[in-house]
Amino acid sequence: MRGRANRGKSDVAGIGGAQHGKVMVFDFDGTVSLGDGPVRSYARFVAAGLDQGERTAFLAAIEAGLTGDVPQHLDPLDGYDLVHLLSARFGVTDSAHSAAYVASRAELASDAAPVVAPPGLADFLADARSSARLVLATNAPDIRIADALDALGLGGAFDEVHTSVGKPAGLESIIDRLLAASIVDEPAAALVSIGDVWANDLGPAFRRGATTALVGPRADGAATPTLRASSLEQLYPALTAWLEPDLSQPPHRTSSAASPTLETKVDQ
């Protein structure tokens, strides 16, 4: 889940991550999973609780907002936050928002809520996996995430998949565990966090001195990422260069200490 609130908390205690060198941490919605289908699904379930006139006005405002026509007094973080902000004038409660969101996730990656991956992402990840541990961390619950990854052509692409993370605080715990398991002298220099919401997806990595890559069209005046582009595929060359071995930073433990196999972990 995106937006301003933390909608879940990742259970990272006891996760035994393999020792590793470089790490790439990816967000899900808006980063590796694109398209307005899930947002429209969420909006439809919110609208179901409104009367006919309100429903029509609300859904029209959502469609306008998704094409960039957002009221000037609003500054949504993403499409989900757009739904939350535009529904406020209709008195939609937090519990109604939560119920609508959970209901919409049951449609994720179906015909009712289609998603697409950034062009070339599967190939990029396959190449990157030979040089880095790949981690997916999302605030979304574990509802059809595996189905969505399959639909995106990314089934099995990540070494770890964390759901209900509760960003940004929950992501801090995951990053701290990844840094502690690193086999390089400067672990923060060997981690990059990639996402479309600065505070949630990149803030924890930034505060630890790691590389950050901000994607998406939103202009955030508070954001100071290392890398920035309107779409993830535009960053492939820079991220590929980042993956190149840094001969000035030898491992502080021999590379043979790293686990020969990488286990996929899905947080429930």
Image (cartoon, rainbow, N blue to C red):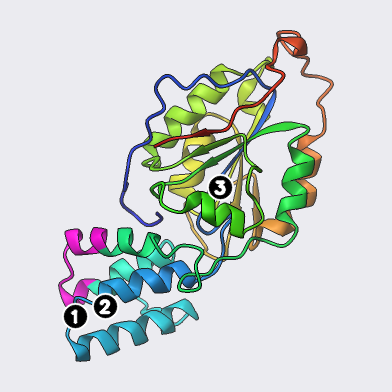
CA neighbours of label 2 inside 10 A, class few (<14), some (14 to 19), many (20+) = many
- Amino acid type of the residue that numbered disc 1 sits on in the rendered structure: Leu
User: Is residue 93 covered in magenta?
Assistant: yes
Q: CA distance from mark 1 to mark 2?
A: 5 Å
Q: Residue at x 50, y 73 (%)?
A: 111
The secondary structure that dominates the magenta segment is helix
Location of residue 34 with respect to 13 vertically, above or below? below
Query: Could you classify mark 1 by the number of other residues whose Cα lies within 10 Å: few (under 14), some (14-19), or many (20 or more)?
Result: some
Mark 1 → mark 3, Cα distance in angstroms: 40 Å
Element at label 2: helix
- Place of residue 110 in the rendered image (x, y in percent of width and height, measured from the top left): 49, 67
Please tell me the numbered disc located at residue 47: 2
Kind of element beneath mark 1:
loop
Q: Which residues are magenta?
A: 88-99
Q: Residue at x 64, y 54 (%)?
A: 228
- Image spot of residue 23 (x, y percent): 65, 31
Q: Residue at x 76, y 8 (%)?
A: 254
Mark 1 lies on residue: 50
User: 10 Å neighbourhood of mark 3: few (<14), some, or many (≥20)?
Assistant: some
Q: Amino acid at mark 3?
A: Thr
Discs 3, 2 touching: Cβ within 8 Å:
no
Q: Which residue is mark 3?
A: 224
Mark in the foreground, 3 or 2: 2
Circles 1 and 2, Cβ within 8 Å, touching? The answer is yes
In depth, the one of 111 and 33 nearer the eye is 111
Which quadrant of the view contains residue 95? bottom left
Q: Which quadrant of the view contains residue 103?
A: bottom left
Q: Which quadrant holds residue 86?
A: bottom left
